[in-house]
Image (cartoon, rainbow, N blue to C red):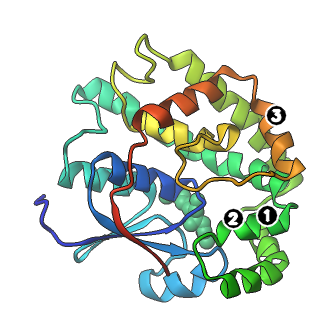
Amino acid sequence: MPTDTGALELWQFRLSLYPEKARWALDYKGIPHVRRSLLPGPHIPKLLPRFGQKCMPILTHGDIVVKGSAAVIDHLERAFPTPALYPADPALRARALELQTWFDDAGMQIRRAFFHEVLPAGAYFADLFSTGYPASARTLYRAGFPVTRRVMKMDMRITKRGVEEGLSRMLEALDLVIKNLGPHGYLVGDRFSVADLTAAVVLHPAALPDQYPLAYPHPRPPQLEQWLARWARHPATDWVREMYQRHRGQSAATEDCNG
Ligand SMILES: N[C@@H](CCC(=O)N[C@@H](CS)C(=O)NCC(=O)O)C(=O)O
């Protein structure tokens, strides 16, 4: 696939898991792109008529539309092969992609537990989600957030059972990292790959690495502190910070606009 297919635009939430995978891949490869950042809730009428779905990341590359984080990384890997996120060796590549799928799947459950525990800190999260928006829009968003939060909970299917599963999946995922670490500190082979990127993104809520593109400002609400304390002693949280420190790099976005 040619690299000059056209301009790239990434549709995303600034605070997110799966769009962060796409963002990291774009930044890692140093691909100039524009970010279109939406707010949870108002994103629905923006995306549905345009793309027929409300779930992000969505990448447009000229006329090509790519939906979903794994598909976005796959597209970028073909269009911009270096630096590679897929191992060259076919067996290692298959293993890296298998781990990507495993962590992608775990992320859906983990975020249920995360949002269940932290979303009661409504004002803090409304402000975090609306970072980068004008003050008037942020005030309005904060006022409407109790409704948005209810929709988010329904949409993510946050139930008691879902939360319990999310907590145990988080532990399983943290353990899986430690079990699979090679001598160079990577999950597959001796280089950073899509497996490390995906695991670090999915587990980032347990570690809040400094290089995550959106800072969680202090003071942090007690719900968030309790959530972080729950995982703080697990050695995989250090690994998540290490991956972000070694490989997150600078943003390659030329612009990050609202909507
Ligand atoms: N499996 C999908 C999951 C994408 C996903 O759940 N995206 C969330 C943000 S982290 C989203 O857009 N949620 C809003 C919605 O579905 O309305 C992927 O890997 O891209």
Are the residues tagged 1 and 3 within 8 Å (C-beta)?
no
* Left or right: 2 in relation to 18: left
* Left or right: 256 in relation to 146: left
Q: Is mark 1 within 8 Å of ligand 1?
A: no
Residue 124 numbered mark, or none: 1
Residue closer to the observer: 247 or 185: 247
Residue closer to the observer: 77 or 184: 184
Q: Would you name the residue on which mark 3 appears?
A: 229
Number of residues whose C-alpha sits closer than 10 Å to that of mark 1, classed few (under 14), some (14–19) or many (20 or more): some
Helix, strand or loop status at disc 2 = helix
Q: Which residue sits at x=23%, y=25%?
A: 89
Helix, strand or loop status at disc 3 = helix
Q: Would you name the residue on which mark 2 appears?
A: 128
* Lower sequence index among marks 3 and 2: 2
Q: Position of residue 56 (x, y in %)?
A: 50, 66
User: In the displayed structure, would residue 103 be above or below residue 177?
Assistant: below
